[in-house]
Image: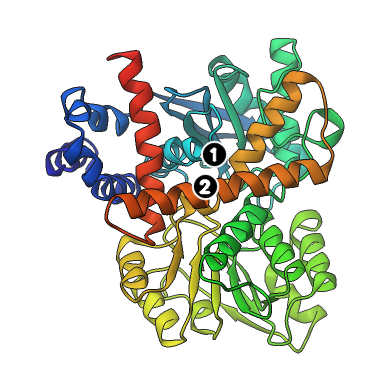
Amino acid sequence: MTHILHDAHDRDPHEKEFLQAVADVMTSVQPVLDKTPEYRHHGIARRMVEPERIITFRVPWLDDAQQVRVNRGFRVEMNNAIGPYKGGLRFHPSVNQSILKFLAFEHVLKNALTTMPLGGAAGGADFDPKGKSDAEVMRFCQSFMAELFRHIGADTDVPEGDIGVGSREIGYLFGMYRKLCNQFSGVITGKGLGWGGSLIRPEAAGFGCVYFAAQMLAARNDTLEGKTCLISGSGNVAQATARKLIEMGAKVMTFSDSSGHIYDEQGIDLDKLEFVKRLKNIRRGRISEYVDQYPDATYTPTTPEMESNPLWEHRGQFVFPCATQNEINAQDAYHLINNNVKLVCEGASMPCTSQARTIIMDKGILYGPGNAANAGGVAVSGLELTQNSIRLTWLGDEVDSRLKIIMKGIHDTCLAAADANGHPGNYFIGANIVGFIKVAEAMLDQGVI
């Protein structure tokens, strides 16, 4: 295993997020590699950590002042051994090849957990939709799709939304694809309900995260009822996580964005959540405005120079990081431990650093890894593809019911795999093993390609 990690580092020494993901996964599947010599002989691990294809392109567009802007676009198609590439598009200034390779690699294993025939990919651009007019966002999305359309398709590569790519951006992207290809297909998921979208899709990652947490608790004869919860982020995943927690009787006390976080000791109820949804989804405002509406709450700003995030210094029994990668570091983890946190369930992709995750798990805190806990988003994306294929739209209750079944299945298979490989209760190792084996077996069946 060491040689695989060394090779990855030698090839891409500056891609810290990707190298972190590779090290985390490959270390945890060591037991499988040790007892399956076929995987070594056929270079499964080596092939799995190398993208099948990386597409990089320029994205020129005109701002409202008629000035030409140029951004860089990407699509990393990691592995399609079990189905068409599937993964998000992220528009954010931090986007680079390392982040997208880590996201694509995580999607390979996450998508395999859903039992759906979906491979793994990720893409996006270093474009920031914040502060841009609708017309500017539209022109950027159209330019971005003018290149991306050559590489995607309902049976080839199916993008979806991620950070910075919401319903507005999906609409512009799909509209341009439809014009360029002269076809209406399920090539992009997260579409509007009136033109091929699925009920529950915007909420799926958050709902699925809570369903996974509920399954972890049920396995220990506990529930979410009455528990205090800390949530980071304030986008779709965070909002849906909060909604489902509230519906299941938990008390939500925090939201955040890149500027800081709010803490509402009285609890964020459904009315307050509706205010946050209007603030973030329609007005595209900052979370600091929450305290203007609810002055009993407090707002704490954050800056990139801070060594830890003060959000994690609040007392809460359960923690749901739903913002971005590596948002919980070692110091944050110790704050959680000092506050007697009982559960960490990841709504974002790799929100804990490797050191933070180790600290959390060594203290016996229940830990739901993102590649299992937040698989609900891609699961319902797969259900959207199915509905597009059969030209039907299922009722929300039916989609939600299928999501619950999928998340329970993911929970049970992860737990069983961890037990079978000598790590009882370790969902992180269990999730990686289940996803790895499924993809590895498909790669073996299909030969060295």
Look at 81% across and 55% down and name the residue there: 282
Of the residues under marks 2 and 1, which one precedes in the sequence? 1
Residue 39 numbered mark, or none: none
Identify the residue under disc 1.
114
Query: Taking 91 as reference, is 185 above or below it?
Result: above
Q: Viewed as shown, does residue 137 lie left or right of 84? A: right
Query: 18 or 433, which lies in front?
Result: 433
Identify the residue under disc 2.
410
x and y percentages locating residue 73 in the rendered image: 50, 32
**Is the residue under label 1 in contact with that under label 2 (CB below 8 Å)?**
yes
**Element assignment for label 1:** loop
Look at 32% across and 50% down and name the residue there: 420
Looking at numbered disc 2 in the image, what kind of residue is underneath it?
A: Ile
Looking at numbered disc 1 in the image, what kind of residue is underneath it?
A: Thr
x and y percentages locating residue 400 in the rendered image: 74, 47
Query: Taking 330 as reference, is 189 above or below it?
Result: above
Q: Residue furthest bottom?
A: 296
Q: Viewed as shown, does residue 431 lie left or right of 145? A: left
**Element assignment for label 2:** helix
